[in-house]
Amino acid sequence: MSSVSHASTPLAILGLDTGDPDSIERWAAEGYLPTIAGLMHRGSWGRVGGPELVCEYGVGLTLFSGMSRSRHGYYYFRQLRPGTYDLVTVAPPVDHAPPFWSELRSTEQRVLVVDVPDVRPLRGLAGLQLSNWATHHGFKHGPEAEPPALLDDARRAFGPRLSIRPAHDPKPREARAILEQLLERVRRKGRLCRALLDRGPFDLSVLFFSETDAASHTFWGYRPEAGRNGASEERRALKHGIRDVYAAIDRELGEIVARLPEETNVCLLSLYGCQDEYPTSTLIDSFLRSLGYHVEATAGGGGGCGRQSTDRLALARRVLPLGLRESIGRRLPGSAQERLLSERLRATTNWSRTTAFAIPSLFTSFVRVNLAGREPAGIVQPGAEYEAVLDRIAGDLRLLTDASTGAPAVRRAVRSTELFGGGPPAALPDLFVEWEPGPRLLTRVVHPRATLVQPAPAYCPDSQESLTGFVAAAGPSFRAGGDVGELDLADLAPTFLRLLERPPAPSMTGRPLGVILR
């Protein structure tokens, strides 16, 4: 394989799956993250935002492909099957939205790619690509590599793969075991990345650590700010568990940077942060049904879709108490629960009277208008009527308050058309609803015409990704600009291609970030 480089300067992108901007800035200033602090001191740094960061899912897909959500259509693992009222589980459309280094095909520019989210190895590229080796996604699809023999090399350098699942506010003994596993995997990942870097040189290296995600959720309740440690010495011993994992990754990043050619452009980035947040999974459905946007089907008819299913579900709803129905549902396999969700939407809805409905989700809520010409039994006409329905929903959302505090319950409700332009979206929700995050479950939400009650769900985490990432960049092609404020997520992929002396791909919506480039 040729080692000739056709980019004027090598580029290394070092990633944290979750990298909270507030925490990074504080710990870098306090000396716990010297590698990241060095990049900030020598170059430019800021926060990653923009319209594309409207929800967690699909952030990595947009970041590395440069393709807008409005084109790749991915926003959650559960979406509507186009042209139906069926809910289906979907994976990121990685083949439809390839990463920016796909533009290096048919060149001699060499790449090293390790565990980048929402990315699979591409054929036709010079170099080494390894995906889903040590990530927080649970290895559902198994690791992949290009060339395939790289999997054996990874086993030799890394050892047995470690699958680590986060726990939410676990007992101290379990938390300690998870912390030790995370620190061990960070060390192994660093060793693996260095071993692969030694097979360079590479024009582009993209290396990701995902352990900060599991650490953030597992030790969120142990933080000093959480105020839950009390007198327990075991809990107090874990109060810096999140910081310890960040610091361990920073040490590995320092050794990686020391392996890079001196003239390398280095960019550290994270997809999102972390914050106090509890599920709001039933609130949007309750809101739409209580205020008459989503109209229930009557037993024996009125739904217009799935009459027989309507009868069966209606009978079950009359015979079985709510608590028992929920208990039965929680014990079913995930695939069966998904089928029940889909059937409930189809079978309990009077589509001839429903103007809007929800796509069930855990945190950010998704509202879909029952639009004529797009939905099978749509009744809302495009144009003025469509806009009027969204106006009414947004107005009602602004009236929602937390019953315990009287504060607004919704942070923002934003339309796809406002974020991405164009007309009503084909795949995306018509409205994204971000609830006010906080350190407790929203159990009662009040509207002038209704009270929404949310029971504690079976899965009730106390933290969730915040919709802001972090970036720091230093090297001969980057300005020493200090804090440059917010950078648009969609502009990162075109910026990386500019550094590799390649034009943006036609599918990209952003443009190179002049504010950080020399």
Image (cartoon, rainbow, N blue to C red):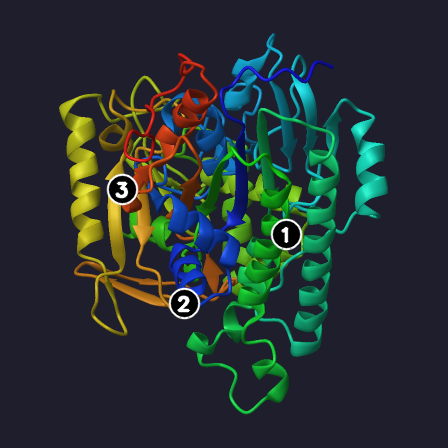
* Image quarter (top left, top right, bottom left or bottom right) of the C terminus: top left
Residue visible at 66% across and 24% down in the picture: 121
For marks 2 and 1 on the same chain, the one whose residue lies earlier in the sequence: 1
Dot 3, how many residues are within 10 Å of its Cα: few (below 14), some (14-19), or many (20+)? many
Residue 293 circle label? 3
**Residue 346 visible in the shown view:** yes
Residue 393 circle label? none
Dot 2, how many residues are within 10 Å of its Cα: few (below 14), some (14-19), or many (20+)? some
Single out the residue that lies furthest toward the top: 106
Above/below status of 294 relative to 281: above
Residue 441 circle label? 2
For marks 3 and 2 on the same chain, the one whose residue lies earlier in the sequence: 3
Q: Position of residue 261 (x, y in %)?
A: 59, 34
Circle 1 — which element? helix
Identify the residue under disc 1.
252
Above/below status of 352 relative to 426: below
Dot 1, how many residues are within 10 Å of its Cα: few (below 14), some (14-19), or many (20+)? many
Q: In the shown orientation, is residue 164 left or right of residue 117?
A: right
* Res 384 quadrant in image: top left
Q: Label 2 is placed on what type of residue?
A: Leu
Residue visible at 33% across and 37% down in the picture: 479
**Front position in the image: 203 or 303:** 203
